[in-house]
């Protein structure tokens, strides 16, 4: 893989350090400061100080070791947001095992693939998924189940005979395993969403995790006094690295909610005096439908777009960003202390080299859209590799060592960059390139629309034509009778004729992948 070899004598920024070092450091210097605050929906919040969390991680790591988990082995963590997921993740890091965090919306065949592909020796899950994991992860030496589902007591009937209780795993913190710190040792795995092929296993080193902690904190202007409200899934890079690891790096606090809830968002924010949140447009639009408090303590939000005009009602500076599981942090980032171009995703981050080119490799001109590539250091600022997939790792880099993201972006004035689309979300309509996102941005602003997703339908003469799936704000039953006509009228007014959807389909929900993103591959199947 280009750029993967570190020259002899080069000293990395985390030489001699690893994830256990960072947690231990915070436990020493911020022992009594709240680190994680678990805020379930229907029970009082519970806080773990840095010292208490560090002790509990040590006890769990000792328990893992007592059950035969060895350094270099893989442990499947199939959990919704909860403190147990983070205890298990850090306990693996302490022991030298590799945490494999998986999307809890995965189907049975996907769960079986994850466990078999990485060779998981153990699994941690919750009652709602216990039978799924037990039935499909057949080569585990043991599995453990928490006593709740995201803070909710489980219904009866989820007992798995061979499963242990999660609480029974803990040993004595004094017996926590000790090993020499190796920043290049494997730390964790996340499986990327698959479209036409199996999901790829993105392997992070300990240096990757520390990079994510340090650089995310710097990009987001996080400080020790901040309180980061976190409700996006912890099995994804956004919540894991942008929120939790960044908070750990500066010694801040992180409020963990089971998932996003528009009805509970502001209450939790007020109770814990939250100052920061990482969010997505789906969540912001839901919050617009509720009363916005006149007084709150937020100073910054991070999202996919800088200062989106539609969300100015919050009165909070919103910085945009772009990143991937493979980049650990943001390769493109909005400005915290300077004005941003509204609807841009930011400027190229100082820690990377960003390249935008056309399909022939020529530099993209200002105002044009091109293919986004990024160069960093594998195992540090870029992922180490796709686990057990040398061909995919090799093919994801070009001859100059740039990682080929599959995203397309547009160059704006003053170095700002606007997101275009995933390459696979580009439609070819009668020879014209059409970005699905361009149509979606028009549709989403039509009154009565909660969410929109555009996909291509095959056409005998034009190759492809756009079809838009729409979730009405009040559901299909409560949608205005004219909603479909209103959407088409807005598109005809704002878009070239070949970009206007040929069909508007109203739905009550859409198939989802990680981070509530619409699974467009599934929508395309509905058209065939």
Image (cartoon, rainbow, N blue to C red):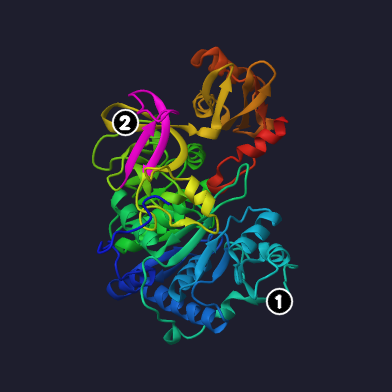
**Relative horizontal placement of residue 378, taking residue 519 as reference (left or right):** left
> Which residue corresponds to mark 1?
162
Residue occupying the point 35% across, 36% down: 355
Give the secondary structure at mark 2: loop
Looking at the rendering, the stretch of residues picked out in magenta corresponds to 352-374
**Is residue 344 at least partly visible in the picture?**
no
**Is residue 40 at least partly visible in the picture?**
yes
Q: Answer whether residue 356 is magenta in the image.
A: yes
Q: Quadrant of residue 135?
A: bottom right
Task: Give the camera-side residue of 185 and 44.
Answer: 185
Looking at this view, name the residue that lies furthest to the right. 157
205 versus 181 height, above or below: above
> Which residue corresponds to mark 2?
341
x, y (%) of residue 324?
A: 45, 47
Q: Earlier in the sequence, mark 2 or mark 1?
A: 1
**3D distance between C-alphas at marks 2 and 1:** 56 Å
Q: Residues within 10 Å of mark 1 (few under 14, many from 20)?
A: few
**Relative horizontal placement of residue 89, taking residue 458 as reference (left or right):** left
Residue occupying the point 58% across, 63% down: 118
Q: Quadrant of residue 459?
A: top right
288 versus 208 height, above or below: above
x, y (%) of residue 84?
A: 52, 68
225 versus 416 height, above or below: below
């Amino acid at each position: 893989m280009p750029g993967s070899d570190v020259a002899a004598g080069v000293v990395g920024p985390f030489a001699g350090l690893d994830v256990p070092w960072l947690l231990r450091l915070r436990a020493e210097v911020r022992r009594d400061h709240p680190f994680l605050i678990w805020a379930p929906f229907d029970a009082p919040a519970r806080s773990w100080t840095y010292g208490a969390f560090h002790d509990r991680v040590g006890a769990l790591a000792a328990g893992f070791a007592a059950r035969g988990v060895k350094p270099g082995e893989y442990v499947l963590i199939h959990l919704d947001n909860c403190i147990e997921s983070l205890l298990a993740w850090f306990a693996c890091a302490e022991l030298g095992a590799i945490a494999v965090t998986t999307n809890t919306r995965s189907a049975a065949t996907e769960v079986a693939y994850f466990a078999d592909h990485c060779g998981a020796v153990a699994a941690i899950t919750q009652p709602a998924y216990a039978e799924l994991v037990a039935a499909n992860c057949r080569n585990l030496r043991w599995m453990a189940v928490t006593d709740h589902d995201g803070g909710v007591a489980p219904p009866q009937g989820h007992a798995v005979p061979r499963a242990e209780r999660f609480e029974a795993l803990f040993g004595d913190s004094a017996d926590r395993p000790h090993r020499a710190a190796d920043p290049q040792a494997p730390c964790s795995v996340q499986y990327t969403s698959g479209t036409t092929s199996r999901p790829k296993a993105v392997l992070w080193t300990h240096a990757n995790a520390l990079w994510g902690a340090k650089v995310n904190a710097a990009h987001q202007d996080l400080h020790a006094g901040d309180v980061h409200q976190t409700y996006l899934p912890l099995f994804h890079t956004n919540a894991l690295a942008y929120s939790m690891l960044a908070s750990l790096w500066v010694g801040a606090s992180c409020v963990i909610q089971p998932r996003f809830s528009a009805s509970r968002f502001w209450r939790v924010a007020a109770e814990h005096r939250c100052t920061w949140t990482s969010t997505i447009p789906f969540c912001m639009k839901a919050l617009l439908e509720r009363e916005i408090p006149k007084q709150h303590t937020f100073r910054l939000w991070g999202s996919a777009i800088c200062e989106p005009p539609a969300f100015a009602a919050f009165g909070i500076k919103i910085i945009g960003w772009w990143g991937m599981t493979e980049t650990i942090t943001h390769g493109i980032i909005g400005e915290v202390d300077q004005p941003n171009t509204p609807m841009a995703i930011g400027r190229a981050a100082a820690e990377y080299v960003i390249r935008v080119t056309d399909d022939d490799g020529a530099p993209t001109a200002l105002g044009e859209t091109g293919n986004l590539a990024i160069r960093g250091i594998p195992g540090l600022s870029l992922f180490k590799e796709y686990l057990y997939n040398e061909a995919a790792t090799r093919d994801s880099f070009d001859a100059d060592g740039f990682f080929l993201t599959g995203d397309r972006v547009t160059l704006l004035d003053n170095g700002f960059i606007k997101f275009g689309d995933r390459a696979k979300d580009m439609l070819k309509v009668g020879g014209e390139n059409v970005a699905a996102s361009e149509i979606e941005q028009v549709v989403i602003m039509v009154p009565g629309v909660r969410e929109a997703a555009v996909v291509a339908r095959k056409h005998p003469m034009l190759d492809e034509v756009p079809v838009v799936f729409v979730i009405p704000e009040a559901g299909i039953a409560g949608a205005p009778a004219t909603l479909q006509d209103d959407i088409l009228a807005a598109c005809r007014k704002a878009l070239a004729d070949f970009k206007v959807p040929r069909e508007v389909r109203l739905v009550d929900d859409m198939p989802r992948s990680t981070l509530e993103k619409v699974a467009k591959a599934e929508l395309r199947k509905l058209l065939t």
